[in-house]
């Protein structure tokens, strides 16, 4: 098996099938205890000790994952990185993981045209989903500043008769603000945007770029929501951001009313600030989604 599947012999055995990520994982799972880590010298050959050959094989084997498609490779890498049995391979696995994340992010990317680049540089125009995402985040930051200390008491809009508003009404206020700010730039904010398979995004930001619609999906949850910690992956990514116009990107927006409010269905939660809650949510976000989904 080593003869035909070893990294150095691949060019001599073109008919031998490529090892997929799942198969590599199965081999590692079976042999990582049988062939434990040893120091690998720079020089080796047929006279190398069996233990060295065995571990070198595992060390080379993981690089086949780098040749797989991101949708197959990333889940496998996530499991391997989270399993302490493979700690000796962590550095190499992390390198492969970073490469696969870049592949995934760029897979559906279409580079902007020269005219669009000029518009981006001269007029600060949105020419990619990434640009759209950054612009919406900036507007949310500006709105947050107005809520925290603006002269128009913007925070009062989120209360009615001294009671906080629910998710739906709060989302309407946020979407209205974004629409007023972004519509002059040709960006449409659509509340309750109907997507595929009866799924609805709380709101989307969309713009026509180069004759093609670019879409940014946003999921909104109140801090009290029981699915607060899982919604970013279970709803935003799995249901919404897989839309082809969204390039697998999105924003998970959490409405914070203070430490006295329930968090994720719990009264005793120990979270004192919005930043603490943001950090908690980001911590449980699957590693393959970091960089694609922003928590705000």
Image (cartoon, rainbow, N blue to C red):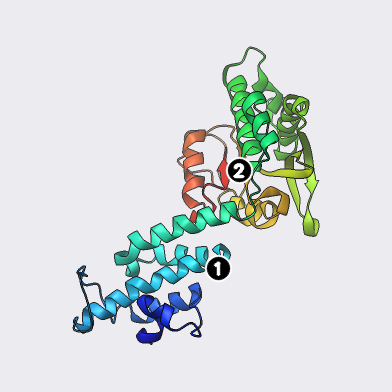
Q: Secondary structure at mark 1?
A: helix
Residue 107 on image: x %, y %? 61, 56
Residue 225 percent location from the top left of the image: 62, 46
Q: Is residue 3 above or below residue 213?
A: below
N-terminal of the pair, mark 1 or mark 2, is 1
Q: Is residue 96 visible?
A: yes
Residue 242 in the image: state x and y as whole percent: 68, 55
The residue that appears at 38% across and 75% down in the rendered structure is: 7
Q: Look at 76% across and 41% down and name the residue there.
A: 210
Q: Residues within 10 Å of mark 1 (few under 14, many from 20)?
A: some
Quadrant position of the N terminus in the picture? bottom left
Find the distance from the CA under tag 1 to the CA under tag 2: 34 Å
Q: Residue at x 70, y 39 (%)?
A: 167
* Residue nearest the observer in this picture, 16 or 185: 16
Judging depth in this view, the residue of 75 and 230 nearest the camera is 75
Taking 23 as reference, is 224 above or below it? above
SS at mark 2? Answer: loop
Residue 286 is at least partly visible in this image: no
Numbered disc in front, either 1 or 2: 1
Q: Which residue is mark 2?
A: 224
Which residue is more in the foreground, 252 or 98?
98
Mark 1 sits on what residue?
Answer: 72
Identify the image quadrant of the C terminus: top right
Answer with left or right where residue 50 lies relative to residue 120.
left
Q: Position of residue 147 (x, y in %)?
A: 61, 22
């Amino acid at each position: 098996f080593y003869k035909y599947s070893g990294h150095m012999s691949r060019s001599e055995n073109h008919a031998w099938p490529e090892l997929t990520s799942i198969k590599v994982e199965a081999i590692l799972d079976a042999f990582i205890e049988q062939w434990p880590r040893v120091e690998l010298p720079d020089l080796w050959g047929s006279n190398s000790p069996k233990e060295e050959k065995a571990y070198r094989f595992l060390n080379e084997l993981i690089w086949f994952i780098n040749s797989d498609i991101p949708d197959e490779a990333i889940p496998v890498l996530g499991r391997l990185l989270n399993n302490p049995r493979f700690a000796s391979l962590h550095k190499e696995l992390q390198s492969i993981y970073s490469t696969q994340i870049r592949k995934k992010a760029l897979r559906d990317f279409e580079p902007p045209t020269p005219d669009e680049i000029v518009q981006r540089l001269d007029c600060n125009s949105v020419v990619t989903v990434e640009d759209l995402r950054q612009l919406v985040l900036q507007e949310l930051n500006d709105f947050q500043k107005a809520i925290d200390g603006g002269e128009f008491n913007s925070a009062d809009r989120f209360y009615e008769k001294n009671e906080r508003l629910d998710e739906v009404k709060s989302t309407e206020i946020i979407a209205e603000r974004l629409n007023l700010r972004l519509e002059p730039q040709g960006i449409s904010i659509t509340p309750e945007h109907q997507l595929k398979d009866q799924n609805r995004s709380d709101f989307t930001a969309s713009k026509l770029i180069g004759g093609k619609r670019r879409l940014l999906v946003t999921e909104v949850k109140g801090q009290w929501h029981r699915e607060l910690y899982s919604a970013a992956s279970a709803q935003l990514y799995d249901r919404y951001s897989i839309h082809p116009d969204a390039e697998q990107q999105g924003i998970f927006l959490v409405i914070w009313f203070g430490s006295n409010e329930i968090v994720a269905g719990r009264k005793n939660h120990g979270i004192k600030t919005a930043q603490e809650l943001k950090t908690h949510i980001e911590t449980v976000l699957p590693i393959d989604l970091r960089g694609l989904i922003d928590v705000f």
